[in-house]
Image (cartoon, rainbow, N blue to C red):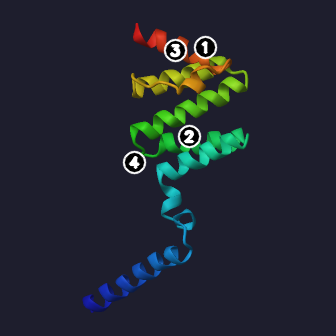
Amino acid sequence: MSGCRNALLGVVVIGLLSGCQALNSCDECWWYNRTASHKLSKGVENYEDGNYIASIEALNNVLQTKLADRDDKVSAYKYIAFIHCVSGREKMCYESFRKALLLNPNFELTPAEAGHPVWGPVFRSAKAKFKK
């Protein structure tokens, strides 16, 4: 009886995995959509499309995912900071940068990001106060 159950379980698992292969994209697989990196990608994609509400939701999901690594969380805080800055919420922008720096004190923006007139000064302020 146990052997039949194991065989049936194996057939089900193979069926599920082959279904994802047939779709030619793990983006369509239920298990991939639950990963922190997928949620981060969706958050960044929504940010780039100007859909800040969906972006914040996806990025907050990254922060709440226990398996998210430090770099994913830092990136999530960075994009949340960008959204707050462009939305005129400077204190929340600053706070998001501060949280990113708490996770990774060596965190830096790219040169293009650092030169942005809205969030560049806020990041520099957070970075300067963080080093004290």
- Name the spot of residue 29 as percent of width and height, x first: 53, 67
For the residues labelled 3 and 1, the Cα–Cα distance comes to: 9 Å
Disc 2 target residue: 60
* Residue sitting farthest toward the top: 132
- Residue drawn at the location 68% of the way across and 41% of the way down: 48
User: Which quadrant holds residue 82?
Assistant: top right
Tell me if mark 2 has few (under 14), some (14-19) or many (20+) residues whose alpha carbon lies within 10 angstroms of its own.
some
Q: How many marks?
A: 4
Binning the other alpha carbons within 10 Å of mark 4 as few (below 14), some (14 to 19) or many (20 upward) gives few
Could you give the CA–CA distance between mark 2 and mark 1, rounded to whole angstroms? 24 Å
* Element at label 4: loop
Q: Quadrant of residue 106?
A: top left
Q: Nearer the viewer, mark 3 or mark 2?
A: 3
- Mark closest to the chain's N terminus, 1 or 4: 4
Query: 63 or 81: nearer the eye?
Result: 81
Q: Amino acid at mark 3?
A: Ala
Q: Give the residue type that dot 4 points to.
A: Leu
- The three-letter amino acid code for the residue at tag 1 is Pro
Do the numbered discs 3 and 1 sit on residues whose CB atoms are within 8 Å?
no
Quick one: 114 or 39, which is closer to the camera? Answer: 114
Provide residue 105's location: percent of width, then percent of height. 39, 22
Disc marking residue 95: none
Q: CA gap, disc 2 to disc 4?
A: 14 Å
The residue type indicated by label 2 comes to: Asn
Residue position for label 1: 121
In front: label 1 or label 4? 1
Label 1: state its secondary structure.
helix
Q: Which residue is mark 4?
A: 67
Precedes in sequence: disc 3 or disc 1: 1
- Residue 1 placement (x, y as % from top left): 27, 92
Q: Quadrant of residue 86?
A: top right
